[in-house]
Image (cartoon, coloured by chain):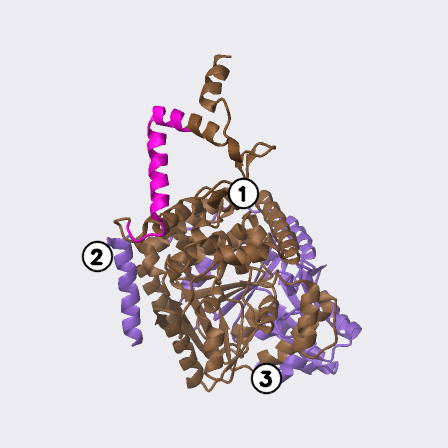
Chain colours: A purple, B brown
């Protein structure tokens, strides 16, 4: 039944487009880049400042930290200040090397496992490391994977992401220039990601008389720690 | 799911008397327009992006079978399943079937015009499956048992007070008046739905052929939850949502979001490729893509109106439209409203179901000016009007135009084609108008058939000296 629906729809499309014969000279499918051509790279500090400015505009919090230790210090004092008792965390290379998860646990915080919905819904904070960021829009880009589960940046009410300053790109065109290569290398392999996400500020809605309200379904607060390099 | 003939005139007449609705419409559309304008002005090269977006849409639609085939192949390669539905009923049947196979008792839905169109909630409920809308606006609409009145902001016709009352009645909670309180209630209620649902249904903003990726744009996070937490994810798309390349998104995303809400980018954009990988700790175990025709393919047959399928559902044409801004979304009678509704509804349902919609426009062309893919709305509207008046058959018979209308149009044509006839008619009408001429030099109530015009608006008085004569005088100077 389904196969015949497929054929019927495609036949209807072909007949509509190419007349009763349905024959069409197939155009060669190009892979040309569609973005605006890249300009010379800007000074990194300009990009960092722009990222901070844009993220702040959309009610996100950005903080520049000068060392890896400072990242850890910030997180440790942050969870204490907020009285957070449970957390979820990515296992990216940097996060593992800094042993953030271990230290939080030895501080008495409970680790929530992303494959357990109950634990996740009680977690007070989700900690991730962005794979890229976009200066022009204040966006962080998260690529899901084995050590980078999707719900960590989604279910807890606070999302804290670390991003290395070297990974902040100018704009969406630069990002896609990067992603297109990354995607085509890994396309249709086990290594390809099931989910890539752009996050720009905390969750928001304007559905009631266009009043802006934060923290509808996703995190109410977003912190981005920019690790200066 | 038999759809009755839509009655735009009747419904819009009622809407025009609703002062609260008109106030709400003014506020919302003004704010959306201002934001869009700012977003448009601040981005250098927006015009180039629109041209490029239109080119890509044209390329895609003209090679649609190739791109749909490519999309299907890549979704399957990444472990997803693809289903094809000729109409809404078949789409619903497929989705109910997926739910049954997986023993699904409850479904969380994120905002999707396609599922509104196929009336999926109704079908799921009939099958004994609970379906919950999770976008705040859609949640409000579902509680009120209504239809969205705007593509982007489905509940804009409701005031804060309306929503306070609705929540208090339906959810048995106190009468909260602050949007923050109302939003918190919705968050709490829906959070437990997300955690217990077995299936999530989402729409699709773009489907990338070369990678099999579907892209979902949102601000609340409900689409992320719907597509991540439940065990099964079903995405529903019209055949026109496919785009060729991943890189094309660097054009479509800014164009869509800036046109829709005036944001530079929405809070969340999810690029989903297949179900979760084996090693992933979360994400759905099954991914199904349902590709729906439901009247779209037949639109392709007309080169005049084919571009109706370029639409990326940003809602900019609603906000700018002088008609939509007065009468609101419900007057259009079906899921799509505003200029896009006026062109897409008669084509999807058939002109005989919505004969008034192509006339629900002043042809001012503001919609064309703001459209991110530059759909030529006036051109399409005129073609659709022709179909209504002359009938869908090429012989021009069977249309709605009566004998009298045909006669009048023929007379008009004769007078326009001959200088003598035109002068004669205009002189004649100058003298004939006196019995009906009001003090302020307007014709406010002419006898039938001209009353068809004057019932709704005045006709200016015919001048004593015709413009042609005055022009001769003016051009001498």
Label 3 neighbourhood size at 10 Å, few (<14), some (14-19), many (20+)?
Answer: few
Foreground residue among B189 and B386: B386
Residue hosting label 1: B457
- Image coords of residue A203 (percent x, y): 64, 65
Q: Is residue B461 visible?
A: no
* Distance CA(mark 2)–CA(mark 3): 55 Å
Quadrant of image for the N terminus of chain B: bottom left
State the residue lying farthest toward the left.
A21
- Image coords of residue B354 (percent x, y): 42, 58
- Pointer 2 and pointer 1 on the same chain: no
Q: Is residue A113 visible?
A: yes
State the residue lying farthest toward the top.
B477
Residue hosting label 2: A20
Quarter-wise, where is residue A197 in the image?
Answer: bottom right
Q: Is residue B139 above or below residue B24?
A: below
Q: Secondary structure at mark 3?
A: loop
Of the two numbered discs 2 and 1 in the rendering, the one whose residue sits closer to the viewer: 1
Foreground residue among B120 and B290: B120
Q: Tell me what residue is drawn at x 45 percent, y 77 percent.
A: B123
Label 2 neighbourhood size at 10 Å, few (<14), some (14-19), many (20+)?
Answer: few
Does the magenta segment cover residue B412? yes
Overall secondary structure of the magenta stretch? Answer: helix
Q: Is residue B403 left or right of residue A161?
A: left
- Image coords of residue B477 (percent x, y): 51, 12
Quarter-wise, where is residue B296 in the image?
Answer: bottom left
Identify the magenta region. Answer: B397-425
| Chain where mark 3 sits | A
Foreground residue among B37 and B121: B121
């Amino acid at each position: 039944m389904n196969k015949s629906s497929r054929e019927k729809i495609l036949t209807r499309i072909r007949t509509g487009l190419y007349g009763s014969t349905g024959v069409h000279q197939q155009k060669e499918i190009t892979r040309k880049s569609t973005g605006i051509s890249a300009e010379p790279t800007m000074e990194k500090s300009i990009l960092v400042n722009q990222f901070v400015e844009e993220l702040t505009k959309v009610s996100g919090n950005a903080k520049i930290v000068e060392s890896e230790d400072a990242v850890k210090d910030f997180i440790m004092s942050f969870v204490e200040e907020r009285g957070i008792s449970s957390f979820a965390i990515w296992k990216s290379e940097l996060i593992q090397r800094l042993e953030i998860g271990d230290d939080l646990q030895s501080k008495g915080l409970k680790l929530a496992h992303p494959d357990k919905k109950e634990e996740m819904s009680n977690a007070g904070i989700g900690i991730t490391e962005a794979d890229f960021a976009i200066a022009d829009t204040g966006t962080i880009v998260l690529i899901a994977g084995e050590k980078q589960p999707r719900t960590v940046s989604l279910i807890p009410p606070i999302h804290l992401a670390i991003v290395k300053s070297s990974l902040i790109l100018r704009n969406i065109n630069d990002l896609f220039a990067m992603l297109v290569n990354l995607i085509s290398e890994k396309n249709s392999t086990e290594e390809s990601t099931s989910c890539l996400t752009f996050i720009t500020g905390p969750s928001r809605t304007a559905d009631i008389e266009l009043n802006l309200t934060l923290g509808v379904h996703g995190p109410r607060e977003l912190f981005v720690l920019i690790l200066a390099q | 799911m038999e759809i009755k003939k839509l009655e735009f005139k009747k419904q819009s007449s009622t809407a025009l008397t609703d002062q609260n609705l008109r106030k709400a419409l003014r506020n919302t559309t003004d704010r959306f327009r201002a934001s869009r304008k700012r977003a448009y002005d601040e981005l250098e090269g927006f015009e180039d992006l629109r041209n490029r977006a239109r080119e890509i849409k044209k390329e895609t639609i003209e090679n649609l079978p190739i791109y749909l085939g490519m999309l299907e192949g890549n979704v399957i390669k990444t472990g997803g399943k693809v289903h094809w539905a000729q109409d809404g009923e078949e789409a619903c049947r497929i989705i109910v079937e997926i739910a049954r196979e997986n023993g699904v008792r409850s479904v969380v839905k994120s905002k999707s015009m396609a599922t509104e169109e196929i009336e999926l909630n109704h079908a799921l409920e009939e099958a004994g499956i609970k379906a919950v809308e999770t976008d705040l606006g859609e949640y409000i609409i579902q509680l009120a048992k209504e239809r969205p009145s705007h593509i982007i902001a489905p509940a804009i016709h409701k005031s804060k007070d309306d929503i306070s009352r609705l929540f208090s009645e339906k959810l048995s909670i106190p009468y909260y008046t602050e949007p923050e309180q109302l939003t918190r209630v919705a968050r709490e209620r829906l959070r437990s739905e997300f955690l217990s649902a077995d299936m999530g249904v989402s729409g699709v903003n773009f489907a990338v052929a070369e990678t099999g990726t579907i892209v979902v744009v949102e601000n609340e996070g409900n689409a992320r939850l719907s597509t991540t937490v439940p065990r099964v994810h079903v995405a529903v798309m019209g055949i026109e949502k496919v785009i060729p390349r991943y890189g094309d998104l660097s054009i479509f995303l800014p164009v869509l979001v800036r046109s829709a809400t005036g944001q530079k980018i929405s809070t969340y954009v999810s690029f989903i490729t297949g179900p979760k990988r084996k090693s992933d700790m979360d994400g759905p175990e099954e991914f199904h893509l349902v590709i729906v025709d439901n009247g779209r393919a037949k639109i392709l047959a007309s080169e005049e109106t084919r571009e109706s399928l370029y639409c990326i559902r940003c809602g900019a044409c609603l906000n700018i439209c002088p008609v939509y801004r007065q009468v609101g979304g419900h007057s259009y009678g079906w899921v799509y409203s505003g200029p896009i509704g006026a062109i897409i509804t008669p084509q999807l349902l058939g002109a005989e179901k919505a004969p008034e919609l192509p006339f629900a426009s002043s042809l001012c062309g503001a919609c064309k000016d703001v459209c991110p893919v530059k759909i030529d709305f006036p051109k399409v509207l005129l073609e659709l009007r022709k179909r209504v008046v002359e009938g869908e058959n090429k012989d021009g018979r069977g249309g709605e135009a009566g004998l009298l209308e045909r006669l009048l149009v023929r007379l008009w044509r004769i007078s326009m084609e001959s200088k003598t006839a035109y002068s004669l008619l205009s002189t004649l009408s100058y003298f004939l108008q006196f019995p009906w001429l009001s003090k302020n030099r307007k014709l406010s109530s002419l006898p039938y058939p001209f009353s068809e015009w004057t019932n709704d608006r005045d006709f200016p008085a015919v001048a004593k000296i015709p413009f042609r004569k005055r022009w001769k005088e003016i051009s001498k100077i």
